[in-house]
Amino acid sequence: AMLRRAGPRLLPLLALALLPARLRAQDATAEGSLTTTWIPGTLLPDRFECETFSCAKWNPWEWYPVDFPNSTVICQEVQDDLTTGFAVYAPDMCRRLKEANLPYENCKKDYCQMFDDAVKKLVHLEGPGYYGRDTCEPFLDFNRSLCEKEYRDAQVFCDCFCPMMPLFDPIPGCEEEVMHFLVLGKRSAILAEKYPMSPLCAADMCRWFELIGNPLPPNPVDIAYGVPNICHVIGFPFKPNPCE
């Protein structure tokens, strides 16, 4: 039971910092553009003016699930792709580049491509029908152009998590759990139940957050160029007890 609760229990604390911005449209425009609405503690605005409510291809009320014999299979294939691609190679890539003092220049492109591929595979005949019902519905709220320029979760992963990956030293097996949660589990309660973190792995992640998220650390970490400012202002639950 504790294993099943570890993921969902973290969702409220991580939602503001990690979940993709819920993009709300106020007026229709051809391209997504910024408004002046900001969420305290974050770097980026939470509202965009788009042709659709969430800046996705279709409005939330227009999407509908299609129930073919292979709909569930396609939804699972998308999840498998998300857990075996970028989520596997990115941590090592980030560590190697940081060791060489080089940036991961294609990080946001690769991160967003992962979810763009997922949406394309889930959508039936250009939409608004989609496969997977409630399990895969969270992936539909996506806009590739905004992802590479404005999405909070892409920025957090690439500008904070990636250069700070050398400080993440989990016990065996936990890196996979943490990455599955960051890529999949945090997107909905259903996915959090399916991709939970054990208490031990959650504690590993929280120790990492404590190292990189505290704007006034008693013992600053020793890493080239220090901790990026975004790690301090994004709103991580870096205190051990609330995070765990």
Image: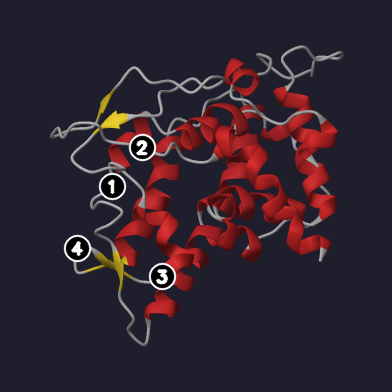
Q: Earlier in the sequence, mark 4 or mark 3?
A: 4
Residue type marked 1: Ala
Residue receiving disc 4: 126
**Where residue 112 appears, x then y in whole percent?**
40, 44
Question: Which disc is residue 19 wearing?
Answer: none
Q: Are marks 4 and 2 in contact (CB under 8 Å)?
A: no
Q: What residue is shown with label 3?
A: 133
Q: Residues within 10 Å of mark 2 (few under 14, many from 20)?
A: many
Q: Earlier in the sequence, mark 2 or mark 3?
A: 2
N-terminal of the pair, mark 1 or mark 3, is 1
The residue closer to the viewer here, 220 or 64, is 64
**Relative to residue 94, is residue 6 depicted above or below?**
below
Mark 4: which secondary structure? Answer: loop
Q: Residue placed at 45% from the left, 43% from the top?
A: 111
Cα separation, mark 1 vs mark 3, equals 17 Å
Specify few, some or many for label 1: CA neighbours under 10 Å numbering under 14, 14-19, or 20 or more: some
Q: Amino acid at mark 2?
A: Leu
**Dots 4 and 3: beta carbons under 8 Å?**
no
What residue type is disc 3 on?
Arg
Q: Can the viewer see residue 49? A: yes
Residue at (18%, 33%) from the top-left corner?
A: 31
**Residue at disc 2, secondary structure:** loop
C-alpha separation, residue under disc 4 versus residue under disc 2: 21 Å
Q: Which mark is residue 23?
A: 2
Residue 74: image location, x then y, percent: 40, 74
Residue that badge 1 annotates: 56
